[in-house]
């Protein structure tokens, strides 16, 4: 039997991480406040929260490429935990458009920890605890599995008072479908910014698509794979550092920047075969599987085979077959070369 690896001095509390991991996996987080001490939050913030932060980096990067900018005003991190969502937000957008950051959680310990970390990282930042009367932006992160019916209605009430809502969840089947149903309830009062290419009803609600779900994949920072701590963490806790599935929803009362004609959203990852690939794609016409053949678009096929397949792309297609790929929203010159066709 292999002996357990020694726990490095100064590393997060492994026992706390294992207890928290059990709570997250068995779904008992909705039953009670699981933060027992500030040490719990510190251990979580250094590990699990970082993985959530990488998902936020992915989502906010997509919004930036989409051409979207957050509204000015207060930002509310609802169900804040250790506050990683708000910090990712400030890292991406800066403080210029943020009048103050509010933290709200059922755990007073978590609220104090999140507020303290924010003040420490951003000296002079206006920080408050609770819920503002009129939040500019509401951030929600990995909360759905801990919301009962009453709590869901409460958070929808908060979201309905906001200018924008950015909601990030695990990319699981269950979380995705709960988010889809909430999208349908909220979209009447908001414009749908992302990940969708349209503001109509979700295409996955069409009969015959029940086995699918709306999810995407974030990438961790490359340095993670050369950091000995993260390798030990992955083995201890049993997580795959490469796999960061995410489902998300972004709503805004302001009209979003228009998307180019032909923009589609790739759901999940393409399935790549010997001479063709198949992808599930969403646009205003609905969700359908399309094929991309190597002989039609060899550069794109090679990119997909290597795992390079941006979520938003602009296609010309006919009969369920991609004929041409042009630059997707926010593409760089090198991206266009990978796309295999000029914009």
Image (cartoon, rainbow, N blue to C red):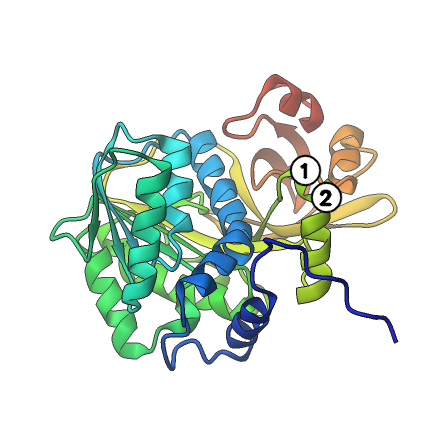
* Direction from residue 335 to residue 105 in the image, left or right: left
**Residue on which disc 2 sits:** 225
Q: Where is residue 70 in the image (x, y as percent from the top left)?
A: 30, 35
**Residue on which disc 1 sits:** 222
Whether pointer 1 and pointer 2 mark residues with C-beta atoms closer than 8 Å, the reply is yes
Q: Position of residue 13 (x, y in %)?
A: 56, 63
For residue 239, above or below residue 263: below
Instruction: Please state which of residues 197 and 310 is positioned toward the viewer in this rendering.
Output: 310
Q: Position of residue 163 (x, y in %)?
A: 21, 45
Residue at mark 1 to residue at mark 2: CA–CA distance: 6 Å
Q: Residue 124: name its quadrant.
A: top left
Mark carried by residue 167: none
* Direction from residue 98 to residue 49 in the image, left or right: right
Instruction: Please state which of residues 217 and 97 is positioned toward the viewer in this rendering.
Output: 97
Where disc 1 sits, the SS reads: helix
Quadrant of the image containing the N terminus:
bottom right
């Amino acid at each position: 039997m292999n002996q357990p690896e020694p726990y490095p001095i100064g590393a997060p509390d492994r026992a706390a991480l294992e207890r928290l991991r059990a709570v997250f996996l068995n779904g008992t987080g909705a039953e009670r406040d699981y933060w027992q001490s500030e040490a719990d939050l510190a251990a979580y913030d250094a590990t699990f929260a970082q993985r959530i932060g990488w998902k936020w980096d992915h989502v906010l990067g997509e919004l930036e490429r989409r051409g979207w900018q957050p509204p000015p005003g207060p930002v509310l991190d609802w169900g804040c935990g250790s506050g990683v969502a708000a910090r990712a937000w400030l890292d991406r957008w800066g403080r210029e458009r943020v009048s103050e950051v509010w933290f709200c959680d059922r755990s007073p310990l978590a609220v104090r920890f999140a507020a303290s970390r924010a003040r420490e990282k951003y000296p002079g930042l206006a920080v408050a605890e609770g819920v503002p009367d009129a939040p500019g932006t509401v951030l929600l992160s990995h909360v759905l599995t801990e919301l009962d019916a009453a709590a869901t209605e409460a958070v929808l009430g908060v979201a309905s008072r906001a200018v924008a809502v950015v909601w990030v969840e695990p990319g699981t089947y269950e979380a995705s479908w709960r988010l889809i149903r909430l999208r349908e309830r909220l979209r009447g009062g908001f414009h749908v910014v992302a990940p969708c290419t349209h503001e109509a009803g979700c295409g996955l609600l069409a009969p015959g698509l029940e086995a699918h779900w709306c999810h995407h994949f974030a990438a961790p920072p490359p340095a993670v794979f050369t950091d000995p701590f993260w390798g030990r963490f992955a083995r201890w806790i049993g997580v795959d550092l490469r796999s960061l599935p995410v489902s998300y929803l972004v709503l805004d009362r302001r009209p979003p920047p228009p998307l180019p004609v032909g923009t589609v959203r790739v759901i999940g990852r393409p399935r790549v075969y010997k001479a063709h690939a198949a992808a599930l794609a969403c646009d205003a016409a609905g969700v359908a599987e399309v094929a991309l053949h190597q002989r039609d678009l060899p550069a794109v096929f090679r990119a997909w085979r290597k795992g390079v397949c941006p979520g938003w792309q602009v296609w010309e297609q006919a009969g369920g077959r991609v004929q041409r790929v042009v630059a997707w929203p926010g593409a760089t010159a090198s991206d266009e070369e990978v796309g295999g066709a000029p914009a």
